[in-house]
Amino acid sequence: MLGRYLTAGLAASLLAGVAFAQTPTTPSDRTNMAPTAASDSAFQGDWRASKLVGLNVYNDNNESIGSINELLTDKGGNIKAAVISVGGFLGVGSHLVAVPYDKIKFVNEPVAYTGVAGAPNGPNAPMIRPPSTTTTGSAGAGPATASSKPNPWYPDHAVYNATKDELKAMPEFEFSN
């Protein structure tokens, strides 16, 4: 039994000696091996893909035609198509269509409100987006003013030149399992 303890102790001391004989790494060596991080200024002008999904889509007449449901990429990560959700209510009954990504325009400024007071408000009336507003000061301090500074990480909305009916007439896009 004593022989086993002596053998184990001798082996442990040899391994410890080998470990201490290695050259230590200096802090500068560790920083050279660390992955490099890019600052947010390196990506200035790039958009967050998570913010593009859900973005409202309008046509050239400022009529709401749907929202971006998904972005489709190739294996290299390049966005090839956007899946637009058209119609429906809270996702139920919506029609998904895939459109080429390069046919979509992104706009940083809010959609210009073109409605007139007393405009028709029926089921066939086009949905027109009101302007974005921000309020400043306390309640009742004055009228809301239009937001003038766009968000640098995502656009305000997308524009695709089609009507809601034209998109609904396109073949439905389905995700295969």
Image (spheres, helix red, strand yellow):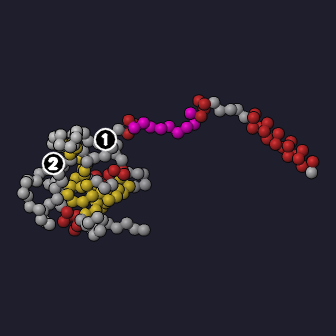
Along the viewing direction, whichever of 147 and 100 lies nearer the viewer: 147
The amino acid at mark 2 is Ala
> Which residue does the numbered mark 1 point to in the structure image?
152
> Which residue does the numbered mark 2 point to in the structure image?
112
- Whether the magenta-drawn stretch holds residue 32 is answered as yes
- Cα separation, mark 2 vs mark 1, equals 20 Å
Q: Is disc 1 surrounded by few (<14), some (14 to 19) or many (20+) residues within 10 Å?
A: few
Whether residue 75 is visible: yes
Q: How many marks?
A: 2
Question: Residue 3: which numbered mark, if any?
Answer: none
Along the viewing direction, whichever of 85 and 103 lies nearer the viewer: 85
The amino acid at mark 1 is Pro
Q: Quadrant of the C terminus?
A: bottom left
Along the viewing direction, whichever of 169 and 108 lies nearer the viewer: 108
Along the viewing direction, whichever of 146 and 30 lies nearer the viewer: 146
Could you say where residue 86 lies in the image, as x and y percent from the top left?
Answer: 25, 63
Could you say where residue 36 lies in the image, as x and y percent from the top left?
Answer: 50, 37
Task: Give the quarter of the image for residue 149.
Answer: top left
Report the magenta residues as a range: 31-40
Left-right relation of 112 to 47:
left
- Whether the magenta-drawn stretch holds residue 49 is answered as no
Circle 2 SS class? loop
Q: Residue furthest right?
A: 2
Q: Is residue 40 above or below residue 3?
A: above
